[in-house]
Image (cartoon, rainbow, N blue to C red):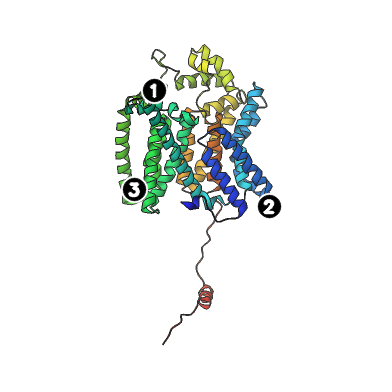
Amino acid sequence: MKELLLINDTKVNKISYYHILLLMASLPFDLFYSHIILISFALHTFIHLKKEKLRSLVSLKMLVLPSVLFITIIATIYTINIPAAFSEWTLRIPILVFPILFSLNELDLKKYRSNLLLAFSLICTVTVFFLFFIVLITIKYYHLPLKDIFAEGFTNHNFSGPIKIHASFFSLQLVIALVNLLIILMKGETSPLLKKLYVLSCLILVCGIIQLSSKSILLILFAVVNIVLPYYLLKGKKWRNFVLTGFAISSVIIAGVLSVPIFQERLVKLFREDLTTNKTVPRNSDSRIERWRVATERIKEKPIIGYGSGSEIGLLKDDFYNAKLYSSFLYGLNSHNQYISFALKSGIWGLLIYLLTLIYGFKEATKQRDVIFISFMLVIAFISVTENVLDVDKGVMFYSFFFSFFSFSNIENERVITRQPSPDDYLSTLATKPLPVTSY
């Protein structure tokens, strides 16, 4: 495990490595730490910048990865809310910064990718363990029964509350951490002791994801574990056995989770309510599909160019009130759908660019058969249906860091050249091969 902290490289590259490691470690926590580390990493990169590295900025990748920020900048030209538009610029700056830094920095991300991802997985595991520890301490302090660990006060946002992160956005990180550990275990290249550690870490991460009880994330996780992982990593009998075992274990876990009242309410009842427009059904908040309907009606008025960056919440606030969605009005909610959000603010052209960006990511990930990159793209594509993932700092940091990290740490630019060995190769090898020494 010491290779996670002690790497054999130049001093400059070591500092870059530790910056990235600290960035990944800070993702689950307060945005202050992530931003400070990012600023430090940027200063370090530009101080040691070599002129020839500037050529790497001219590429398709450098156009596609920051495209979301480019949409925001262009849609500011005709926005109806200038201050909110510039706030959106500030929020999305990391989407441009990370590709630039990974492109200009000398550190070989391909070389240290597995180290960094393993460190991130273990950090997420320790974080979830810490949150469960907080829950148990609280239960003990207030003399509550242990079964209350599954009560409303300790699940979803209340579970992630101590580290001040939205439950769904923390779940995104846990999925990446879990998938990475599962890939390591499936490859079977670890010692027995480390294997036990990784299995335990997987169990802790699964428990954390269940405790956070984000409906969309659980669906994504089920698809990734039971379809994506075996499809890309296994063949023949191993594939069949894994799929059958995976579905059996998943079914048992689902049955166990749904037997707990709080999870049954969140994952079944609230899911059903989110997909209904029946306002006679008693609920604590407005359903997502109602917010989507209101936002879609507004989009119909300006479908081509939209209303400009930063316009969403201001526009929808009055619309929510007129539609009697009073909870959404009072809390100033957005549409809770990233695709609708782009269509509302930047029209069809902005939505199309975002879709093309996702398609680019899927194409690169599948071309390299990069399972964890594919999992990341699935997570982003699905969470964009239920959340404005790019309108929250933790969502932007997750999207911008991992999209750039996976894009710059894959092997797309490496080409293996093979040729038939020639007689000259054989003679050269024979001539340089040391002769055996024998004794009589």
Q: Residue at x 60, y 36 (%)?
A: 35
Of discs 3 and 1, which sits in the foreground? 1
Work out how far the residue at label 3 is from the one at label 1, CA to CA, in angstroms: 35 Å
- Name the disc covering residue 287, or none: none
Regarding residue 411, the answer to whether it shows in the image is no
The tag earlier along the polypeptide, 2 or 1, is: 2
The amino acid type found where label 2 is placed reads Glu
Q: Can you give x and y, in whole percent of width and height, for residue 428 in the image?
A: 54, 75
Work out how far the residue at label 3 is from the one at label 2, CA to CA, in angstroms: 46 Å
Q: Can you give x and y, in whole percent of width and height, for residue 112 in the image?
A: 52, 51
Residue matched to label 1: 270
Q: Nearer the viewer, residue 221 or 11?
A: 11
Residue matched to label 3: 239
Q: Is residue 388 left or right of residue 256?
A: right
Q: Is residue 160 left or right of residue 15?
A: left
Q: Residue furthest bottom?
A: 440
The amino acid type found where label 3 is placed reads Trp
Residue matched to label 2: 52
